[in-house]
Amino acid sequence: MPLNIAAFIWGDHPSASYRAIHPLNELARRGHIIGFYPDEAHLTPTDEELDALEEEFDVVFMMRHSDENAQALARRLRERAMPVVWDYDDDVRSEEFIARATAMAQAVDVVTTTNDILADRHLDRGARYVISIPNYLTRRAAETPRRKHDGLVLGYIGWIDHQEDWDQLGLEEIVRELLDLHEDLRVESVGPLDLRLPTERYLRTDALPFDQLPGRIAGFDIAIAPLIDKIGNDTRSDIKLKEYAIAGVPWLASPLGPYAEHGEEHGGQLVADDEWFEALDDLISDGKLRKKLAKAGQRWAREQTLERNVDIWEDALLEAIELAEEREAAA
């Protein structure tokens, strides 16, 4: 039976596409009806607006919101026995956030997050039920063709917090040496980080709209996902490897956190901190290996789409409805 889902999402956050917009759009393709509430003003409805919300929708989905208004709304919905799912996927450890997350976890029926480590933290904060849902690939990522280009492109998609990974692993010096060794090698990065490479061989794009990322990745020949052992890296998502793999791009990644269990069957290789030069040089020099990894990666990534896995999101919403009904019956 189709669900009517009210979605209160923090649409300006980078993870909104992975954790709300595209999962909900995929649910809509299954026949569910979505009402998007992207503005913070919607977090403070009047009693009449809340009456209308209760009458029109079967379940409420809240993504990232955790301030006092979000907490109050979650409590008001709970008082009306409205099922609520709250999604939060970041590893924030400040006292202020922990207090907000605890209030949200205890007010809603189901918490969703990206991995079991974060799920355990929400349980420790008093969440009633937590479901780990990885980030999955969008239809755009799965359907974007390879982009023809000159030379061999080494690509890196990273946010500002990846600058420290790049710097501490000494990758600037390593890639500069590889540029000297391989005349046809170029480098592209997307995101608010600066690799500080020679501008004639390096294209830096500060940021791109989410749906333009697959097209840029489709022009890479090799991609990297370096991580250092620091707080927050162990709870990241593996979506970057999925996005590289679906585009047919062999990847090199650090054997930490979300990447630790991945390997050649997923389209790439894990690289120890002191082996980045050798790993990159080997992959740049070996076209057959690149093709082998690219094929394996695409086989794996085709199973990692929202289209194939959106039932996990559907189950989370149905679980919230069931728990709300149990709560109402007990009351």
Image (cartoon, rainbow, N blue to C red):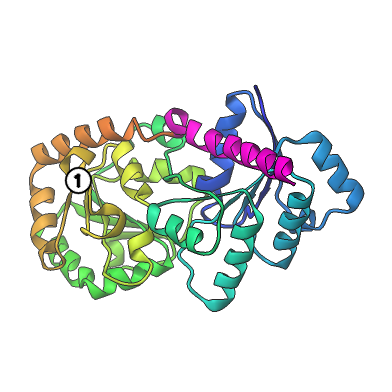
Specify few, some or many for label 1: CA neighbours under 10 Å numbering under 14, 14-19, or 20 or more: many
- Single out the residue that lies furthest toward the front: 330
Which span is picked out in magenta?
A: 306-331
Question: At 29% from the left edge and 40% from the top edge, which residue is drawn?
Answer: 245
Residue 240 percent coordinates (x, y): 35, 49
x%, y% of residue 257? 29, 59
Apparent side of residue 38 relative to residue 304 in the rendered image (left or right): right
Q: As displayed, is residue 57 above or below residue 110?
A: above
Q: State the image quarter where residue 91 is shown.
A: bottom left
Query: x, y (%) of residue 44?
Result: 81, 58
Residue in the picture at 17% in, 38% down: 293
Residue displayed at 66% across by 24% down: 2
What element does badge 1 sit on? strand
Q: Of 95 and 156, which appears nearest the observer?
A: 95
Q: Is residue 95 above or below residue 9?
A: below
Q: Indicate yes or no whether the magenta region holds residue 315.
A: yes
* Residue nearest the observer in this picture, 310 or 179: 310
Residue 312 visible here: yes
Give x and y (percent) for residue 282: 8, 52
* Identity of the residue drawn at 35% across and 70% down: 163
Locate the N terminus and report the quarter of the image it occupies.
top right
The overriding secondary structure of the stretch rendered in magenta is helix
Which image quadrant is residue 286 in? top left
- Say which residue label 1 marks: 268
Q: Is residue 152 magenta?
A: no
